[in-house]
Amino acid sequence: MSANLNANEYAQHKKQIQEDLDKRIAKYRARTGAQKMMLKEATLAGPKPLNLLAQGDSWFDYPLPPLSHSDIIAHLEAMPLSPSILNLAHHGEAAEEMLGVQKLRRLTEQLNAPHLNAPFDAILFSGGGNDLVGDQFRLWLNNAAEVSSDPAQGLRPARVDAIFGIVKAAYEDLISARNQAAQAQNRRIPIFTHSYDFAIPTGKGVCGAGPWLKPSLDDRGWDKETGKAIVHQLLAQFADLLTQLQNAHKDFFHIATQGALTSVSQWDNELHPTPKGFALVSAKFVAALRAEFPGRI
C-alpha cells in the first residue's frame, strides 16, 4: 500500500512540475508576443533585449521566493536591461539529472518552435553538478583507511572517468540538438554553461534535501579539510571537461565561475550559494553574454 501511495505521489509530483512549466511557457509566449506587436507598431529606442532559453538544475530554479534573487535566472531577470527568459529548469526534477529524455524533449520542442516562441538568441544550461556531488558522491570515493591521506588519492579514477563519460555524452547531445536547430533556422544559437564553484562539505542541506557531501566523506573516513580538497579536485576536473568541450565545439561557452565565491558565508548550504553568492556567479554570466551580445544585456 505504501509503495502504491508513493508511486501515486510521484506521479502527481511530475504532473505538477509539467503544469508549472506549461504556465511558464504560456506566460513567456504572452510576453514575447506583446513585444513582437510593439516592434511592428513602432521602432523601439535602444537595443533589443536578449531572448534566452534556459534548462538545468536548481542553480537556475532554486526553491526560494523569486524576490530574494535566489538563483542565476532570478538575477538575470532583475537586471535593468533584462532578457526574456523561457526557464525550463525546475528544482523538483532532482531525479532527472543532466539531459534525460524528458528534459531534452522539452528543450528541443521549444527551441524548434520559432513560430510560437521568439527565436532564441542563446541557450543557458546548468547541469552536471548533481551528477558529480549529489547523493551518489560516495561512489566516487576511496576509503581513507585504504589509501594515503593525500586528497589526490581520495577519488576512484575508473569510477570518476565513467561518470565524466556520462556527463560528456549529455553535453554532446545538447550540442547536437542545438546544431540541428541552428541549421534549420539558419542562425547562431550559442550555448552558455558553467562549472559551479568549489562546494564546501559543511553538512548543511536545504528544504529537507541533503546534505550531499559530508555524509559520503564521513562514511569513507575522510576528515573535513581533506574532504574539502577532494571535492575541489573533482569539480576542477569538471571545469576541465567543459573547457575541452568549448575547444571542440563552435558556439559552446564555458563560463568559468569557479573561484567567484571566496567564503563559506556565501554558501547557503553544501550545493547552493546565498542570494549574494548567486549574484557573484550571475555577474560571470552577464560578462559572458555581453562579450557575445554587446549592448543587449
Image (cartoon, rainbow, N blue to C red):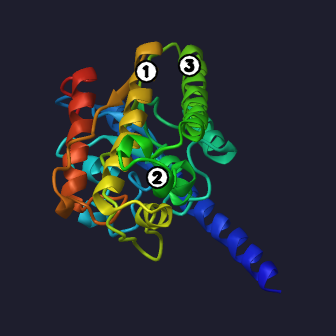
Which of the pair 19/7 is nearer the observer? 7
Amino acid under disc 2 = Val
Q: CA distance from mark 1 to mark 3?
A: 18 Å
Label at residue 244: 1
Residue at horizontal 69 percent and vertical 76 percent from the top: 9
Q: Which amino acid type corresponds to the residue marked 1 in the rendered image?
A: Gln
CA gap, disc 2 and disc 1: 20 Å
Asked which quadrant contains residue 242, the reply is top left
Answer above or below: position of 203 versus 170: below
User: For this rendering, which residue is in front, 182 or 31?
Assistant: 182
**Are the residues flagged by discs 1 and 3 in contact, CB closer than 8 Å?**
no
Crowding at mark 1 (Cα within 10 Å: few <14, some 14-19, many 20+): few
Query: Residue 142: image x %, image y %?
Result: 51, 50
Residue at image coords 28%, 49%: 77
Q: Is residue 3 visible?
A: yes
Helix, strand or loop under label 3: helix
Give me the disc on residue 133: 2
Q: Which residue is mark 3?
A: 179
The residue that appears at 56% across and 34% down in the rendered structure is 161
Q: Which of the two marks, 1 or 3, is nearer to us in this view?
A: 1
The picture places residue 290, in percent across and down from the top left corner, at 22, 28
Residue 251, placed above or below residue 234: above
Q: In the rendered view of the protein, which quadrant contains the N terminus? A: bottom right
Q: CA distance from mark 2 to mark 3?
A: 29 Å
Coordinates of residue 4 in the picture (x, y in percent): 81, 79
| In the displayed structure image, the side of residue 224 where residue 179 appears, left or right | right
For this view, does 39 lie left or right of residue 56? left
Amino acid type shown at disc 3: Asn
Q: Earlier in the sequence, mark 2 or mark 3?
A: 2
Compared to residue 113, the image places residue 245 above or below, namely above
Can you tell which of label 2 and label 3 is closer to the viewer? 2
